Amino acid sequence: MTRWTPDPTFYPTPRDAAGAPAEQLAYVAAFDRSARQPDAIAVVDTEPSSETYGRVVGWTDLPHTGDELHHFGWNACSSALCPTAPHPHVERRYLIVPGLRSSRIYVIDTKDDPRAPKIVKEISPEEFGASGYSRPHTIHCGPDGIYVSALGNGTDGGGPGGIAVLDHTSFDVRGKWEADRGDQFLAYDFWWHLTRDVLVTSEWGTPDMIEDGINPELLLGRKYGHRLHFWDLAKRTLVQTVDLGDQYQMTLELRPAHDPSREYGFVGVVVSVEDLSASIWMWHRSDSSGGYEVTKVIDIPAEPAATEDLPPALQPFGAVPPLVTDIDLSVDDQFLYVSCWGTGELKQYDVSDPFHPVEIGSVHLGGIVRRTPHPSFPDERLAGGPQMVEVSRDGKRVYVTNSLYGSWDDQFYPDGVGAWLAKIDVSAGGFAVDPRFFPHGDEFRGRRVHQTRLQGGDASSDSYCFPSA
Amino acid sequence: MTWGQLAALAGLGAFHGLNPAMGWLFAVARGMQERSRRVLLTSLPPIALGHLASVAIVAAVVSATSSVVAANIVGIAGGAVLVAFGLWRLLSERHFRWAGMRLSNTQLTGWSFLMSSAHGAGLMLLPVLAATPVATGHSGHVAPAGLDGTPLAALEGVAAAGIHTIAMFAAMAVCAVLVYEFVGVNILRRAWFNMDKLWAAVMVGAGALTIALTA
């Protein structure tokens, strides 16, 4: 049933959302790389005054094995307040959880007992395949349905990847989103400028390019994605494609400004094949052409390393690439967090001037060579690095998990990537790991951990239709 | 039309105008997006026009039908439609689907027409409209009822829709300007009462009343 007043976690403007209360719980996607145990949603206590703060306090196993949970999202968010198709009396209660490898999607209810979420619906790979797609990835709560990006076509592990839409209420697969995709073939992330009728998509690779691990021939042949696509959200047609240059391999996470009156956003590039650097680019509407321009605003160089410290895949290069694989923009659009999964670093940038980001903070955890331990467990050399990064709505807490993608973990951290979730506290002039918060190792029961979602919403879950000022 | 009917039409107009989903919130969003009160104000007439079109179609059909078919048949059939539609609205959790916020004035009128029609705004006027022929010759008439009994009676339906829309426009304008200028959109979090549920309940009630009055 619908509510009598709007769901209290919906906010009309990003500024209102930044004043939201702190999250009590975090939901974490946990998967078994060996596909022998089922994947799970782990529930972590994030309330500092609680006795179980920083511990796994809930666990929901899925009924199948081999799903490879990865990203997930909410059934509804602040976009429900958007005025053209408002539905603010629905509840934010269901997590829409895709299996990236299995193409199965679970709908998981967090309402009755938020610490013991219940699976209420399963969309089979065949049902999802009816959309023409497979390997569902990003979930966003849209104005007229739930949008799901997918890496592959519905049949053979190739492309094109694209976006499917699920019904808001029944969660049935409504079908393919695109009316005209032009020459778009590779897919990965997507998000939008809702009030501008613009949807943006990025490019990774088709399932057969990624599922068995990163393919050096494809990488050095510059075959992974290096473009951004801008679409008409209302007409569902491709309007503009911007090529960053084929040396910039893998344009991944898209983080548009939350304030709907601002029309720019950031995208991370994993690696340049010329020097193994990573980069952050900013798209923005050009005054002169009316279209979008994309500008490189951050370069992160590779770090030289001794051959014996490197996994076989990197030994020919004698360096560690930063491997920027996730970025997140605070709800107030002031700070950008950048995960360097290879070098084991989370960087904080002041992006109040989005054309000129300034690095103002950094913490090290893990890393291919450094293996920086958590401050509270100084004897444990950590594998993996900050990867999926999630920022609380008030911008004061940043959560990072350490797995990238099963088969790729194995290449870059061949002695085991482990599993950990760390929290970094942000304050004026401060950026430091919370020593009290570090669920890791056996707490995750042999699974690896990927995306974190915060109860009530977070910096990458909600879109807004009303400007802050 | 009687004064009572006029008041009822205007009252329902204000009720429709107050509903954020019917357009005033969209006008506010457009104004905020462009940081312009003028954009807000110029968004209101196209929205009202779309509402008028949606309501007028139903009103014209009902009034014209009433003039050639026995009034009680129109009342009972219309009442049944209204109850059914209201129950469907009440029980269904589906919401109006629309993607796209950068609309021209023509598109804005079209959006408003679809939004009003999907919510059955015109149907809600049925009890008032169906009562019109019954009131023929009543001393309380505001205007001569000479059109009754001819297909031109549809014009009276259109006039009813016009009165309704003027009230809707006024309520919408007051809400939009108050929220834009003084209150701020954060009020939505507390004050956006579930109009859809109330709306559907009003429909069921109005349908039942129509049947009761005409049967």
Image (tube, rainbow, N blue to C red):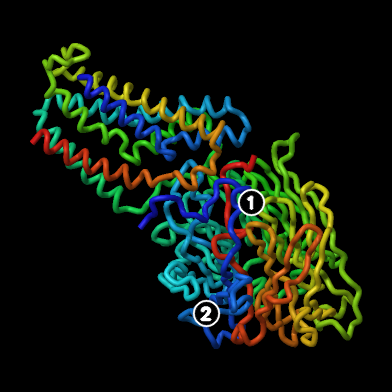
Is tag 2's residue or tag 1's residue first in the polypeptide sequence? 2
Q: Residue at x 31, y 29 (%)?
A: B11
- Within 10 Å of disc 1 (Cα), the crowding (few <14, some 14-19, many 20+) is many
- The one nearer the camera, B177 or A119, is B177
Residue A152 in view, yes or no = no
Residue under label 2: A59
- The one nearer the camera, B123 or A229, is B123
- The one nearer the camera, B142 or A140, is B142
Left or right: A248, with A92 as reference point: right
Q: Which residue is drawn at 44% across and 61% down?
A: A173
Q: Is mark 2 on a helix, strand or loop?
A: strand
Where is residue B36? Give x, y as percent.
Answer: 61, 29
**Above or below for B166 versus A377:** above
Amino acid type at mark 1: Val
- Within 10 Å of disc 2 (Cα), the crowding (few <14, some 14-19, many 20+) is some
Residue under label 1: A200
Q: Which of marks 2 and 1 is in front?
A: 2
Circle 1 chain:
A
Q: How far apart are marks 2 and 1 (CA)?
A: 34 Å
